Image: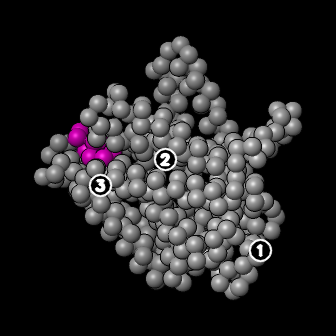
Amino acid sequence: MSIWPLGHVWPASPAGCFYRFIPVGLPAALHIATGFGQALFGWHDAQLLLAELGTLAIVWWVGSRGASSSANLQTLVAVLIVALIVVVWWRGGISPAQIPFPAPAEIDRGQLFLALSVMFWCFVGLEAFAHLASEFKHPERDFPRALMIGLLLAGSVYWACTVLVLHFHAFGEEMAAAASLPNIVVRLFGVEALWVACVIGYLACFASLNIYIQSFARLVWSQAQHKPHSYLARLSPRQIPRNALNAVLGSCVVSTLGIYLLDINLDALIVYANGIFIMIYLLCMLAGCRLLRGRYRLLAVVGSILCLLLLGDGRLEKPVRAGDAGGAVAVFTQAQAGDGKRVGLQRKRPGRIC
């Protein structure tokens, strides 16, 4: 008899890959989120560690209150992000007529595919959404709608941010990508407004971390149903998988402490997490090749090929999200030093944000 608490689920499945993501991907996202605390309060080392543990405690509190609390939080963060982008557009005087759209003949295909590979990571996280399908009253109707609205909203936000970066020329060899938007905020509103940007940045990271942890708790609980009497298969009086949530958060705490004590580089965590995501997508696409028919099987074949290309593309090992908080830190530091006219950031590898 197997002693594995989740029944027959083990590494050779997408669920097994998700479990491997927990001890590396979640602490990395947590470290990026609390990095904004360094920009605001100058935290370092042990202070950042305490902030990470405190963030996990807040995630536990939100998760213990039910799915509606998480949904309200996600909605609030989305509204704040959209509001920030709208205010920056308005203050910058950007109109649709000022947006340049290159002709198809002017597009560099090599650069286009490189940009598409970066855009791939902008939408990483949709797979966690699937674990929350049981929270919908009518999943067959509401789940596709929520998925498409989320895709359109995320795509619109990334497009609007790209327009801002190009309009203000907030890019180049002398500036890291993560510093672009903080640079624009400082130019338009001054260094005081960077506090607002950092708070919204932290909330955005917290929202992603929260939805991942809540979805992983649901995944653990659903897989534990193979052994209905197990500890992880139980629900709280509010019908919340609190035991599974405690297990996921406990794993995050242990991993976070281990990463801190061993001083593991953030780059290594993100590269490993990115590889796990590609393997999850590849396994799902291969399953689609076997289970689906007609044009849907063709789409699964195309998706499998794309995943293999991503897996073999060495350029994707560069973590494109690791420096989000680091960019804010650098901009904040330079602005505080009095360089308000032109705020830049020299390129450097994002390691521990401290």
224 up-or-down from 32: above or below: above
Residues at marks 2 and 3, CA–CA distance in whole angstroms: 19 Å
Q: Do the residues labelled 2 and 3 touch (CB within 8 Å)?
A: no
Residues at marks 1 and 2, CA–CA distance in whole angstroms: 35 Å
In the rendering, at what x and y percent does residue 232 appear? Answer: 23, 51
Q: Give the range drawn in magenta.
A: 218-226
> Hey, which quadrant is residue 138 in on the image?
top left
Q: Which of marks 1 and 2 is nearer the N terminus?
A: 2
In the rendering, at what x and y percent does residue 351 appear? Answer: 62, 71
> Hey, which quadrant is residue 256 in on the image?
bottom left
Write down the residue under mark 1. 342
- Say whether residue 219 is magenta: yes
Instruction: For residue 6, say whether it is visible.
Output: no
Q: Which residue lies furthest to the top in this view?
A: 294
Front tag of 1 and 2 = 1
Q: Earlier in the sequence, mark 2 or mark 3?
A: 3
In the rendering, at what x and y percent does residue 261 appear? Answer: 48, 78
Write down the residue under mark 2. 125
- Mark on residue 259? none
- Say whether residue 144 is magenta: no
User: Which residue is depicted at the point 42% across and 67% down?
Assistant: 255
Q: Are marks 3 and 1 in contact (CB under 8 Å)?
A: no
- Tell me the kind of residue under disc 3: Ser
Residues at marks 3 and 1, CA–CA distance in whole angstroms: 41 Å
Secondary-structure class at tag 2 = loop
> Hey, which quadrant is residue 86 in on the image?
bottom right
User: Which residue is depicted at the point 45% across and 63% down?
Assistant: 203
Q: How crowded is mark 3: few (under 14 residues within 10 Å), some or many (20 or more)?
A: some
Prevailing secondary structure class for the magenta stretch in the rendered image: helix
Q: Which of marks 3 and 1 is nearer the N terminus?
A: 3
Front tag of 2 and 3 = 3
- Tell me the kind of residue under disc 2: Gly
